[in-house]
């Protein structure tokens, strides 16, 4: 199996962390410290920083993210979504709405791959459908970072 590195690995760590803390809530700084103390995780500083930023961002913006998801899942209560799908969607929507350095198409493709790897094809199709609908209404380029900050 090919080793996953860089942003793909970072996103997988974000999903793993958020999924894990949803079922085992813990004070955030302590949870992050425990998460990074795992011997198998050896991130580059930039990847570790990215993971920490996205985790904090998803948690800080969760109300707005969930409100967006509810609009694009035909008013389906976000808490009723499968836990993995919900987590993958939250991470992708956070990137699409709040990370100008990540093109939306990248967030979508990464979310699809993570959903496929951890939950299967049906989950990947669902994630793709929701994120594609959101992306179509974004006021930013879909394939490039957003450099129009004003």
Image (cartoon, helix red, strand yellow):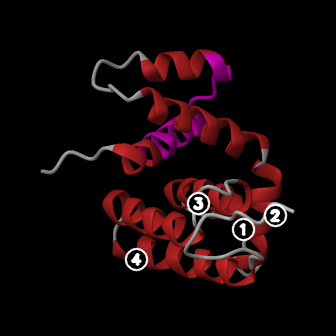
Of the two numbered discs 4 and 1 in the rendering, the one whose residue sits closer to the viewer: 1
- Give the image location of residue 68, x and y in percent: 78, 67
Which residue is disc 1 drawn over? Answer: 69
Cα separation between marks 4 and 1: 18 Å
Cα separation between marks 3 and 2: 14 Å
- Give the image location of residue 37, x and y in percent: 41, 15
Q: Is residue 88 above or below residue 29?
A: below
Magenta includes 13? yes
- Give the image location of residue 21, x and y in percent: 57, 33
Of the two numbered discs 2 and 4 in the rendering, the one whose residue sits closer to the viewer: 2
* In-front residue for pair 137/28: 137
Question: Which numbered dot is residue 92?
Answer: 3
Cα separation between marks 2 and 1: 5 Å
**Which range is magenta?**
12-29
Which residue is drawn at the image coordinates 74% and 76% (left, top)?
138
- Give the image location of residue 49, x and y in percent: 54, 31
CA neighbours of label 4 inside 10 A, class few (<14), some (14 to 19), many (20+): few
Which residue is drawn at the image coordinates 66% and 77% (left, top)?
135
Residue 114 picture quarter: bottom left
Determine the secondary structure under disc 4: helix
Which residue is disc 2 drawn over? Answer: 67
Residue 90 picture quarter: bottom right
Which residue is drawn at the image coordinates 52% and 43% (left, top)?
19
């Amino acid at each position: 199996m090919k080793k996953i590195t860089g942003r793909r690995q970072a996103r997988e760590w974000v999903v793993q962390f958020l999924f894990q803390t949803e079922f085992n809530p813990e004070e955030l700084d302590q949870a992050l410290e425990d998460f990074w103390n795992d011997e198998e995780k050896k991130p580059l500083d930039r990847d570790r920083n990215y993971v920490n930023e996205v985790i904090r961002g998803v948690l800080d913006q969760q109300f707005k993210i969930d409100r967006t998801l509810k609009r694009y899942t035909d008013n389906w209560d976000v808490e009723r979504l499968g836990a993995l799908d919900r987590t993958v969607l939250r991470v992708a929507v956070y990137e699409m709405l709040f990370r100008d350095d990540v093109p939306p198409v990248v967030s979508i493709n990464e979310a699809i791959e993570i959903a496929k790897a951890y939950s299967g094809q049906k989950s990947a199709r669902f994630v793709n459908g929701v994120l594609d609908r959101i992306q179509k209404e974004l006021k930013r380029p879909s394939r490039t970072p957003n450099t129009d900050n004003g």
